[in-house]
């Protein structure tokens, strides 16, 4: 588990995620042309539960979409 400080809507908060999830979030943000903080802020605005859990679910959903897209091609 790795805790990092991120800035969301102008305030700092800590998020604890496994390094694999941090790496995946960085890659997703890069592919979308966003900073990591911008992506996390976007996800924070639409979440319904714990931020760390929401980030993990988002990464999983992105990986699943990517896997389905590769199978279709």
Image: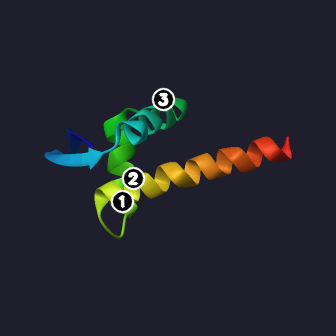
- Residue at the image position 17 percent from the left and 47 percent from the top: 14
Please indicate, yes or no, whether residue 42 appears anywhere in the rendered image: yes
Q: Secondary structure at mark 3?
A: helix
Name the residue furthest front: 1
CA gap between label 1 and label 2 equals 5 Å
Whichever of labels 2 and 3 marks the residue nearer the N terminus, that label is 3
Name the residue nearer the viewer: 22 or 18.
18
Q: Which label number is shown at residue 53?
A: 1
71 lies left or right of 10: right
Residue at image point 27% right, 43% down: 1
Residue 62 lies left or right of residue 42; in this view the side is: right
Give the numbered dot on residue 30.
Answer: 3
Q: Does residue 9 show up?
A: no
Q: Which mark is residue 43?
A: none
The alpha-carbon separation of the residues under discs 2 and 3 comes to 16 Å
Q: In the rendered view, tell whether residue 32 sits above or below residue 43.
A: above
Q: Residue at x 39, y 52 (%)?
A: 55
Query: Which residue matches tag 2?
Result: 55
Asked if marks 1 and 2 touch (Cβ < 8 Å), the reply is: yes
Question: Front-most of 68 and 30?
Answer: 68
Q: Is residue 36 left or right of residue 31?
A: left
Sequence-first tag of 1 and 3: 3
Circle 3 residues within 10 Å: few <14, some 14–19, many ≥20: few
């Amino acid at each position: 588990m790795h805790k990092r400080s991120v800035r969301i809507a102008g305030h700092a908060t800590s998020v604890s995620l496994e390094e694999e999830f941090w790496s995946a979030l960085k890659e997703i943000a890069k592919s979308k042309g966003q900073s990591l903080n911008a992506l996390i802020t976007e996800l924070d605005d639409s979440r319904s539960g714990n931020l760390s859990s929401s980030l993990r679910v988002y990464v999983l959903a992105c990986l699943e979409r990517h896997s389905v897209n590769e199978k279709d091609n």
